[in-house]
Image: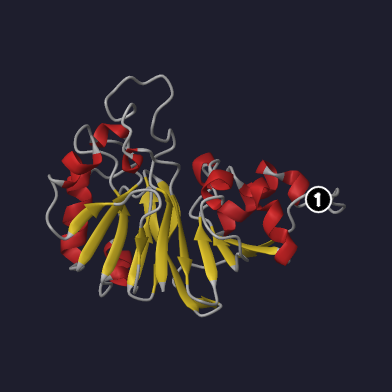
Amino acid sequence: MRMTFLGTGTSSGVPVVGCDCEVCHSTDPRDMRLRSSVMIETDNTRVVVDCGPDFRSQMLRVPFRKIDGLLLTHIHYDHVGGLDDLRPFCVFGDIHVMADASTAEQLHHTMPYVFAEHLYPGVPRINLDVITPYSTFMIGDIPVTPFRVFHGRLPILAFRFGKTAYITDMKRISSADENVVKGVETLIVNALRFEKTHAAHMLVDDAIAFANRIGVRRVFLTHVTHEIGLHDDANAKLPEHVRFAYDGMTIEGL
């Protein structure tokens, strides 16, 4: 099993429109971050987590093949704004989109034309499945265990795939849910920036402290802002087992 980072930025992306900082003017592709999303694959199965407004650009960078499942963490636009761009993938059949009950309900209001009784030609054909936290299921040969984290006060989903966990937009996690991720070897977790606390997101030190509590072997930080600094400089500030992910980065052997 392997994971590809389709995007590692926050809701604004990097570069930020109108910003003149050195990160936003960097020519290093690792400093250019689309909205956060990952793709988990085996030879037989492809799963995507979140489908933000950069989805089309992200999928142009990878081989075109069937998406066996699309998992949504929550309803915020930077995580669902690209759902209409699923249309090309419908050549393989309807797309199975999976979300918790709250996100599924809100999608009907966000994109009502996708779920109308009579669909007009060209609309993405989506099968929307409600998933329940803590119930493990299979997408092809990939095991998926959803669990809860809190994005500020908003409960959202995170996912465990065997020995790997993917968490985005987390501010806090309950001790019970922390137990769900104990035993993972690879953790992908959000870390907004080094300083200036945020009401709905962890900072780098928060993410590292969480990773140390659950005892993971390697950590990749995602959902970061331009305030993190240039990629190489930012990585130099981290412990050896912690790295900043970047768009296009692939982790093998999960």
Observer able to see residue 136: no
Q: Quadrant of the C terminus?
A: bottom left
Residue that appears at 67% across and 46% down = 84
Residue that appears at 52% across and 60% down = 48
Relative height, residue 113 to residue 165 (above, below): above
Q: Is residue 248 left or right of residue 105?
A: left
Mark 1, secondary structure of its residue: loop
Q: Nearer the viewer, residue 212 or 154?
A: 212
Q: Nearer the viewer, residue 239 or 179?
A: 239
Q: Is residue 171 left or right of residue 62?
A: left
Location of mark 1 (residue): 116
> Residue 68, image x and y in percent?
60, 69
Q: Residues within 10 Å of mark 1 (few under 14, many from 20)?
A: few
Residue that appears at 29% across and 30% down = 23
Residue that appears at 24% across and 41% down = 231
Q: Is residue 215 left or right of residue 118?
A: left
Relative height, residue 2 to residue 236 (above, below): below
Q: Nearer the viewer, residue 72 or 37?
A: 37
The kind of residue on which mark 1 rests is Ala
Relative height, residue 39 to residue 163 (above, below): above
